[in-house]
Amino acid sequence: MRKLIKNSILTVLLTIIVLSVFPTTVFADEFEPRLTAPNGEPYYTSELNTYSQTGYGMPNCVAYAFGRIYELNGEKPKIDRGNAGEWWFINKYNNYYEYGSEPRLGAIACWSGHVAVVEEIAEDGAITVSESHWGGTYFNTSVYYDMYAHYGQSFYGYIYAYNEPEPEEEPVVKEPSYKMEEAYFEPQEMTCFTALEFAQSNNTIMNPNTNSLLNTL
């Protein structure tokens, strides 16, 4: 009897808790770095890539960066014109995206004649970028400790075009609106009663505040 009552209490409480749980956030996908060349994805071809559509597709650093941001965000980048040396200023003058000197995953690294996309940032400060080169290598990755030392070009900074997802939050569990006192069930656990005894007691057996019948048994 005692075991049955405790199991019933546990079932009720678990049901209340489950029904009171509401997630506060849609869990975001983790950033997946691109360390291998595109393989026909529409973001890098004339299907979706503005540069490819106008005859300036890969190998081309801006065509690749355009496609990579398109791939990351799932929407067309706001910067869809100009050469590599112009991207930093086009973004700054049009206030398309935030920008700065701190590396972030998915950020566009901008030099005076080149752009690349940040794919990994190591604890020791090493920055891995993915890139393409106009009239040269179709795709490659490079690791830099000093972004200012890139082909002798001036480094402008990073354009934060990647829409980084919000951090995951723990689900909120609401407290039950009432608490069940364990003492309420103690009289039932002390002894067992026959049907005759229960009828003669006028139901006072089930009243935890009435112990007169218990004292006479």
Image: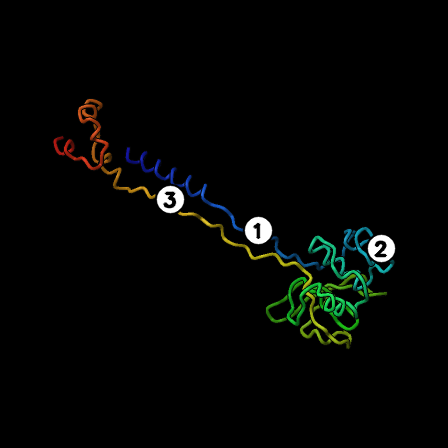
Disc nearer the start of the sequence (1/2):
1
Percent position of residue 177, x then y:
37, 44
| Residue neighbourhood size for the residue with mark 1, other residues' Cα within 10 Å, grouped as few (<14), some (14–19), many (≥20) | few
**Residue at disc 1, secondary structure:** loop
Amino acid type at mark 3: Ser
Horizontal side, residue 74 vs residue 29: left or right: right
Residue 183 position within the rendered picture, expressed as x and y whole percent measured from the top left: 25, 41
CA distance for labels 3 and 1? 28 Å
Foreground residue, 87 or 117? 87
Q: Is residue 55 left or right of residue 116?
A: right
Among the 4 quarters of the image, the one containing residue 199: top left
Find residue 158 and report its image quarter: bottom right
Q: Position of residue 87 (x, y in %)?
A: 77, 67
Which SS class for mark 2?
Answer: helix
For mark 1, what is the residue? 27
| Residue closest to the far left | 216
Q: How many other residues sit within 10 Å of disc 2, few (<14), some (14-19) or many (≥20)?
A: few
Residue receiving disc 3: 177
Please tell me whether mark 3 sits on a helix, a strand or a loop. loop
Residue 91's label in the rendered image is none
- Disc assigned to residue 53: 2
Name the amino acid, label 1: Phe
The foreground one among 55 and 95 is 95
Residue situated furthest right in the rendering:
55
Image depth: mark 3 or mark 1 in front:
3
Number of numbered tags placed on the structure image: 3
Task: For marks 1 and 2, give the CA distance.
Answer: 35 Å
In depth, the one of 51 and 64 nearer the eye is: 51
